[in-house]
Image (tube, rainbow, N blue to C red):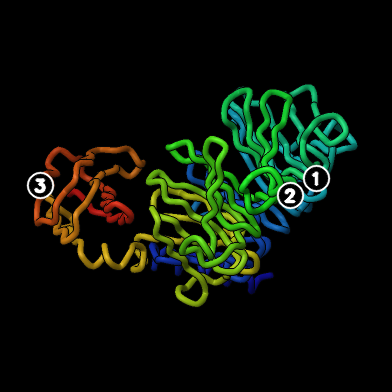
Amino acid sequence: MIKRYLLCLIFLLQSILLYPQAVINYNYSNSPLPDNQCRWITIDNLGKKWFCTEYGLAVFNDTNWSVYTTANSGISDNSIKHLAFDQQGVAWISTSNGGVSTFDGTNWNSYMQTNSGISSNYVRSVHIDSNNNKWICTDAGLNFFDGSAWTVYNLLNSDIPVNHISTLLFENDSTRWLGTINGGFSHMINDSFYTYSGVNSGIPDNSIVGLARDTNNFIWLACPGGALVRYYAGSFYAFNTTTSGMPTDALTSIAIDTFQNVYMGSFDKGLIKKSGNYFTWWNTANSPLPDDNVYCIAIERPGILWLGTNTHGVVRFDENMWVNSAPVSLKKNLSIYPSPCSSLLTINSQLPLSEITVYDIAGKIIYSQNKNITPQHFSLNTEFLLPGCYWITFKTFDETIIRRFIKE
């Protein structure tokens, strides 16, 4: 144990000295992370990372760690699947065998079959709606909890397609989308369900393990056998190894950033990014990523991702420091300088651009030009910008590149 904590200290010192790096790996050997299998990562409003592992919950504020297990806290089970925060900042923690545990920073509570109306102690995920109600996805149906009463939707009392619910996405207060295991993609309106499956629609996989919505109201599905699926207005389109540049059909998770880039975890090809119609991926063969099985993705800010892996702990991935983050054709024909800049940022583009957008560090749009921009050498006035770090995106009609610059 002493040896492990000495290794942790050495690793933390190395992280401080070398930070930032393109890939920083925290695992059981070099940090207090309690287990190398991480199923979910949530980043709270203070920037702390909550790692759900197979042997406890770890919280990391970029300097210090806190670890919660059944041995030192009131958490009900060490196998953690998912975590979400309610409107009071209480963490709702999904477990494999202990139902749902809650933690307000001081006090613990648990909802299990022995003390509540929850339908199963195996909980895949918890989702909080705009009214602070909890929707709990289990292997024995969908549970609704308003803080006092429980409602369970299962095969016996509703037209839900299966009892094993994996994830949920809210459309509004009365409408929800459900991802299931072997039951398809279900649209829940009030208490009624309409389900899209391989039998009645073009959906390629009846299991959905991740859901996300972009700003165009497209819903994106991550499927363990059907790759990436886009849904809109009753129609599905699959991005897989046959129809697109996807490197695998086996996905584990999905996340979308403020630039509408779609990031996917996979079982065998590491981290995958869809930007426009272009696909990039990072794995053990082409990057320092330590594991080809990426279970989950959390976006801290544009270009900074946290990845949970199957056997190698968690990874902080800085895409902005990674060379191959954009299509080669656009990357080689675009340059910006100087950075830091004072009053002018020079842009040298040898390709026609359809859009230029400048964002601040929080993702707020500061400047945008969306008319066609012919290839040229021109300057962008930056005098109106406050000192700090900014992101600038350049788009052609099928590619996007993100660059970072500093205003001094």
Instruction: Check contact, mark 1 vs mark 2: CB within 8 A.
Output: yes
The image shows residue 69 at horizontal and vertical percentages of 74, 52
Q: Residue 139, labelled with which disc?
A: 1
At which x and y percent is residue 18? Answer: 39, 68
Q: Circle 3: is it few (<14), some (14-19), or many (20+) Cα within 10 Å?
A: some
Whether residue 407 is situated above or below residue 270 in the rendered picture: above
Q: Residue at x 59, y 62 (%)?
A: 249
Percent coordinates x, y for residue 28 in the rendering: 63, 67
From the viewer's perspective, tell me whether residue 254 is left or right of residue 114: left
Task: State left or right for residue 25 relative to residue 352.
Answer: right
Figure quadrant of residue 186: top right
Q: Please name whichever residue, 81 or 89, is drawn nearer the observer in this view of the structure.
A: 81
Question: Which residue is at a point 55% across and 41% down the rendered structure image?
Answer: 235
The circle drawn on residue 181 is 2
Q: Which residue, as the protein is rendered here, is positioned at the far bottom?
A: 285
Say what amino acid the circle numbered 2 marks.
Answer: Ile
Q: Mark 3 sits on what residue?
A: 343
First in sequence, mark 1 or 2: give its number.
1
**249 and 332: which one is in front?**
249
Q: Amino acid at mark 3?
A: Ser
Local secondary structure at mark 2: loop
